């Protein structure tokens, strides 16, 4: 019996994440509403809070999926590139990030909005995913700066991620700097190229 | 008579911006609510829409003030620094930006959230303020790269602004990368220093 209840809980959990994922994809974080999810899942409103602590937990679960897809996209850009220069590898990863952000605009934005909205600590797996992503950047940073202290390698990888993120976030998300795709690509190449001495 | 009506309109306009500025400072963009503003200004709800097209216009006016203060803070960081190296000047401006963002968290965030919320074109003065800010960065970029084509100087200045913005936005606004003030300062120095060859 316990197994059956558990299985039903897991099925509802998955259904709710699936539904919330569609909402986030179509309308961003604010489109996730408990009442609508319950109606579409065919469950009582209270049932949602039996499987998730609150709506925030569902959004975090959606972000978890987005993060996995983002990591896969960035990693895929390195395939057949192990012989490329560190600069070229970093630019390839940056462009994969840009492609992902463009193709998954709302889900990508939700990754960075969720903590701000809720003001609660991000879960462990979130930090681990982020660490994994930064790890992909640390490798070419080490190749570029073989004498750089490890503390700085870690900060440089984070700084370069943040730089590329900043170029893309400002370029895609508002009209502050009105940046075309070609200009974003050039900006990424200018920063990464000059930081790494085009190695 | 026309002058008197005009003066009253202007006074209400200023009162509403003052009140909205306090709201944005205390609670961000979502804290600006027409009904509350009308109550606090002692005017009818409809009167707001006689002086502003909609709530979005009030928020844009608040952002205008924030932008002026931000520009002044960044410019002030260059005082007595004309003899400093371009790298040092860019780092000084970046730290002024970090100071401003930290001290004006909500108002600063509102600068980048407003267009996303409304989905309308930013006004001309917005672009002009942004151009002015980028202009401050273009000068040391030119000093660092005397042979760089002007198109690239413009893009490099925007890229460096976006990079520093990305480092600060991710560092301050959520727990994705858990960055301390000291680490943010180091990340800025690593990116700016390496891009400019520490000149």
Image (cartoon, coloured by chain):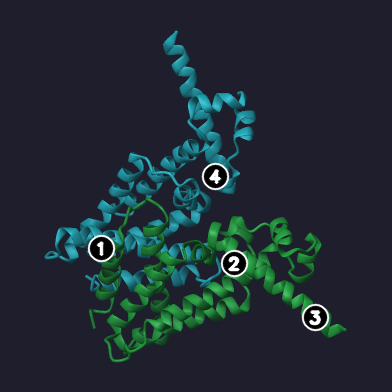
Chain colours: A cyan, B green
Graded by Cα atoms within 10 Å as few (under 14), some (14 to 19) or many (20 or more), the crowding at tag 2 reads: many
Compared with residue B126, is residue A164 higher up or lower down, i.e. above or below?
above
Q: Mark 4 to mark 3: distance in Å? A: 46 Å
Q: Are marks 4 and 3 on the same chain?
A: no
Label 4 belongs to which residue?
A: A24
State the image coordinates of residue B153 (x, y, percent, origin top left): 39, 83
Give the residue drawn at x 63%, y 33%: A35
Q: Nearer the viewer, mark 4 or mark 3?
A: 3
Dot placed on the residue nearer the N-terminal end, 1 or 4: 4
Q: CB under 8 Å between callouts 4 and 2?
A: no
Q: Is residue B101 left or right of residue B23?
A: left
Callout 4: chain? A
Q: Mark 3 to mark 2: distance in Å? A: 22 Å
| Residue at the top extreme of this rendering | A1
State the image coordinates of residue A49 (x, y, percent, origin top left): 53, 27
Image-quadrant location for residue A175: bottom right
Q: Are marks 3 and 2 on the same chain?
A: yes
Label ID, residue B21: 2
Element marked by disc 2: helix
Element marked by disc 4: helix
Q: CB under 8 Å between callouts 1 and 3?
A: no
Element marked by disc 1: helix
């Amino acid at each position: 019996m316990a197994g059956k209840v558990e299985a039903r809980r897991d099925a509802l959990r998955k259904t709710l994440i699936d539904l919330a994922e569609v909402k986030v994809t179509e309308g961003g974080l604010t489109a996730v509403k408990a009442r609508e999810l319950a109606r579409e899942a065919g469950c009582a409103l209270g049932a949602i809070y039996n499987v998730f602590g609150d709506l925030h937990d569902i959004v975090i679960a959606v972000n978890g999926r987005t993060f996995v897809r983002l990591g896969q996209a960035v990693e895929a850009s390195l395939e057949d590139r192990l012989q490329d220069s560190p600069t070229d590898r970093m630019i390839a990863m940056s462009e994969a990030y840009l492609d992902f952000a463009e193709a998954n605009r709302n889900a990508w934005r939700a990754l960075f909005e969720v903590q701000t909205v809720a003001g609660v600590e991000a879960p462990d797996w979130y930090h681990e995913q982020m660490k994994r992503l930064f790890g992909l950047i640390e490798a070419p940073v080490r190749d570029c700066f073989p004498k750089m202290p490890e503390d700085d390698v870690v900060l440089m990888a984070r700084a370069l991620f943040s730089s590329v993120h900043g170029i893309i976030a400002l370029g895609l998300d508002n009209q502050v700097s009105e940046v075309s795709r070609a200009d974003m690509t050039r900006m990424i190449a200018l920063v990464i190229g000059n930081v790494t001495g085009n190695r």
